[in-house]
Amino acid sequence: MKQWIKLTATVALACTFSSAPLLVQAKGQPQVKISTSKRGSSLQGAIQIATQHHKTIHFKFCDITLRELPDYSTLSNGFVMDDAFNKLSPKEKGTVYNKWAYSPVGKKYLAAARALADNCRVVDIVPNSKGQFTIPNLKSGTCNLFIRYYASSKGVKIDKLIAQKSEKVSIPSSNARVTKTFILQQVIDHAVGEMAPNFAIKTIYGKKISLKDYRGKFVLIDFWAVWCAPCRAELPNVQAAYEQFGGKNFHVLGLSLDNDTQTPIKYVKKHKLTYTQGFLGPWKNDNVTKLYGIRGIPSIWLIGPNGKIVAKNLYGQKLHRAVKKALAQVKK
């Protein structure tokens, strides 16, 4: 039975007006009004979490992040991706875009876009012991509000998410009082030290494998897909870790979320990825990502010989350091 955590935030908004707006303008070039004139709003919230699911609520383990969003609709003369552009090859698209980006029009547009983004704040706060919080000096427009509630151990917050909610919040340009109720759905999130969920799948070549096959060894599992650009960027690093540390005590298992097996088969052959590749199929139909609570890829985990999670959210040199540290402890 799904558990739900109810979080209520009462939001009070008050706006003041300051100096004249900043205007970026050039003849025949894009114009953008940066809303410095409307900054001064404040957001006040009160959080309540239903106690029937948690006997004791510690609001210090609740994180709130607010991100102001730039309004790019105020810009004109932006880069247009029409039907003709979409028919071009990737190389041709890059050439066309770079030509626009380095043109006077493109430079003015990108400068204005950066100015908009630079005028947006990102605020990270923790509510007080009563679940109350205040975020001052906001500008009118739209914000993304992220609320996360974490587990704790011996009075210390641990990297295990219990519940979360994200929602767009509108900050009006006039005095207003807004009351919102956020329902945080309990999420699956496995902490370091917990048992990694077992799974049985097939490789991209049709061979049956399971995570239990790797008991007694360290195994790096990488949720990825060919269609995912950040995944492709990380693959050389994963391959390098396999080449450096691979052996009887360390293995790598890729978990492809592509629509068909031929796509990863062609990719791994072309890019000479020599470690085992499992196939999960389309993300929306897959159960392994649900077991692990995967919310974005690439997602790389290190599983120990005992089947417990050693590290997660690995990438770049962090991945290499985690593997090296784990193997060094075995040698001791």
Image (cartoon, rainbow, N blue to C red):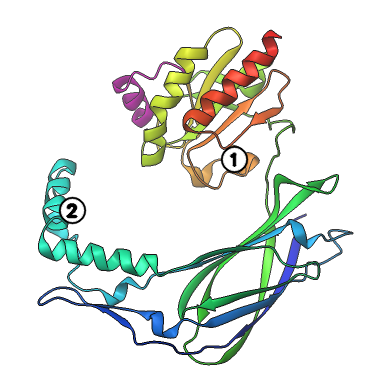
Q: Residue at x 73, y 20 (%)?
A: 306
Q: Residue at x 34, y 69 (%)?
A: 116
Whichever of labels 1 and 2 marks the residue nearer the N terminus, that label is 2
Report x, y in % for residue 211. 63, 23
Report x, y in % for residue 108. 18, 66
The local secondary structure at tag 1 comes to: loop
Query: Of the residues shown, which amino acid type is indicated by label 1?
Result: Asn
Query: Of the residues shown, which amino acid type is indicated by label 2?
Result: Asn
Inspect the magenta stretch and tell me whether residue 272 lies in it.
yes
Q: Which mark is residue 287?
A: 1
Q: Residue at x 72, y 27 (%)?
A: 308
- The residue nearer to you, when weighing 11 against 103, is 103
What residue did someone put label 2 on?
86
Report x, y in % for residue 25. 19, 77
Q: Write the start and end of the magenta stretch as one range.
A: 262-275
Instruction: Please indicate whether residue 19 sits to the left or right of residue 146 in the image.
Output: left
Mark 2 neighbour class, 10 Å CA radius: few under 14, some 14 to 19, many 20 or more: few
Q: Which mark is residue 68?
A: none
Which residue, as the protein is rendered here, is positioned at the far bottom? Answer: 175
Instruction: Using the image, determine if residue 221 lies above or below residue 117.
Output: above
Q: In the rendered image, is residue 41 in sight?
A: yes
Which residue, as the protein is rendered here, is positioned at the far right? Answer: 55
Quarter of the C terminus within the rendering: top right
Inspect the magenta stretch and tell me whether residue 97 lies in it.
no
Mark 1 neighbour class, 10 Å CA radius: few under 14, some 14 to 19, many 20 or more: few
The quarter of the picture where residue 34 lies is bottom left
Q: Residue at x 55, y 27 (%)?
A: 221
Quarter of the N terminus within the rendering: bottom right
Instruction: Please indicate whether residue 263 sits to the left or right of residue 10 in the image.
Output: left
User: CA separation, marks 1 and 2?
Assistant: 34 Å
The local secondary structure at tag 2 comes to: helix
